[in-house]
Image: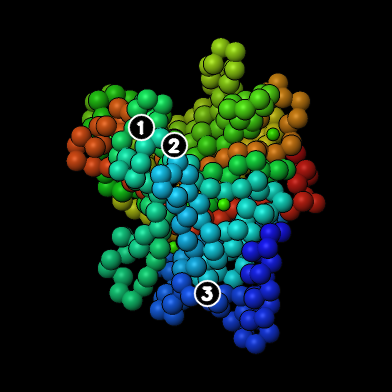
Amino acid sequence: MNTKTKLKMLSCIGLSLGLSTGCNTPNIDQVNEDDLTDVSYNTKSDLADSYRPDNMELIFHSGFQPGTQMVDPIPSHKADLEGIDYSLQEKNDWDAFDDHPNIGYFNFQLKDGNVNDRKVELISDPTAYNIIGKRNTVLHYWLKNARENNNRKGRVEANIAHAKGLNNFYASQRLFLHKDFDILKSYEHKITWLTIQEFWNNPNWDDSEYPFRVTLSINKKSSGTVDELYFNIKAQTYNPLEKVFDTIWTDTNASIPVPVEKWFKLSTHFIEGNENTGRVVVKIMDEKQYEQTLFDVTNWTTHPENPEVYDGVPHFSSMKLYTKDSIIDHVRNNGGVLQMYWDDFELWKKKEKDSFNGR
Ligand SMILES: [Ca+2]
Ligand SMILES: [Ca+2]
Ligand SMILES: [Ca+2]
């Protein structure tokens, strides 16, 4: 535990002795009273959890509400969140999240370019303009120009890096795809690479053996203009000698179109395992709490040659925007910018005593 976390806990205890409101009472200057009385629009309490695996324990959650601060050094290829989301009662401290025994650290990665090319920021929810008296803060991803790898691709992503022992976990968040995502429907070619979630088990950018990833992406199924975009999931091994990915399983949901300009909850349950014990379940739920399963895959969720099948997923992003130059260019050249709003992030893990049962 770092000093900062200790101080926060102490102030928390002090406040809870005197005030029934306990730890969500503000004790820093940056939070004013208006922010706290205006409870988040469509926070978790408004959008119920109809699906979450049993016997999970909460690692962390945040609605990015007041108390949460973006730390964005300029010039920056990285950014981070600090502080405490005072709209929630516990597991709401971004610094404590970095210190959690299962988590290496959380941050944002943006890679090459500057704020004119891509950015991540906390903004007032632009979709809630008609909700009088409500106030909500969301995470805004904005990707205008491909600057990474000699202008071949671009990204904004929230990373959980160097996680330990996370072999059965559940991540959920609300997502709103800006209307400019509709411009993708007129892209000339198929889209097979527009990543919105990625799970590395293990990574391919260090000396880890058995590189492998599961990717959730937004796809366009045919060339020419289409009516809808669809979700795809795929698992790939990586061969470091030949520098190639091999797809070992994949699926496209052809019946549930990607919702554009609508809030939906995206939840992913990831269980590390082999062809019989590995599992990925991805669901979306609309604002009327109608939930649909996009994918329910039982298959390898680690490299099939990896003898350490259950040692955890070390790196993942459940809030990602990552694609290639021509797709980013198409949106910009047609008057838009690829943009996403994210809210109400939650990360859960299977309770320790249950974690290896039931396989
Ligand atoms: Ca929020
Ligand atoms: Ca951090
Ligand atoms: Ca592993």
* Image mark count: 3
Q: Which residue is label 2 attached to? A: 111
Q: Which residue is label 1 attached to? A: 147
Dot 2 beta carbon under 8 Å from ligand 2: no
The answer to whether any part of residue 346 appears in the image is yes
Amino acid on which the number 3 mark rests in the picture: Ile
User: Which quadrant does the C terminus fall into?
Assistant: top right
Q: Which picture quadrant has residue 280?
A: top right
Q: Which picture quadrant has residue 358?
A: top right
What x and y, as percent, mark residue 221? 35, 28
Residue at 62% in and 27% down = 206
Q: Earlier in the sequence, mark 1 or mark 2?
A: 2
SS at circle 1: loop
What x and y, as percent, mark residue 191? 35, 28
Which of the two residues, 224 or 254, is positioned nearer the viewer here?
Answer: 224
Which of the two residues, 173 or 231, is positioned nearer the viewer here?
Answer: 173
Residue at 35% in and 41% down = 114
Q: Kindly report the distance in space between the C-alpha atoms of the residues bearing marks 1 and 2.
A: 8 Å
Give the vertical position of 63 relative to 108 (above or below): below
Tell me: 255 left or right of 202: left
For the residue carrying disc 2, how many other residues have a C-alpha within 10 Å: few (<14), some (14-19), or many (20+)? some
Give the vertical position of 53 relative to 329 (above or below): below
Amino acid on which the number 1 mark rests in the picture: Arg
SS at circle 2: loop
User: Which quadrant does the N terminus fall into?
Assistant: bottom right
What x and y, as percent, mark residue 130? 27, 68
Residue at 63% in and 53% down = 98
Q: Which residue is label 3 attached to? A: 28
Asked if marks 1 and 3 touch (Cβ < 8 Å), the reply is no
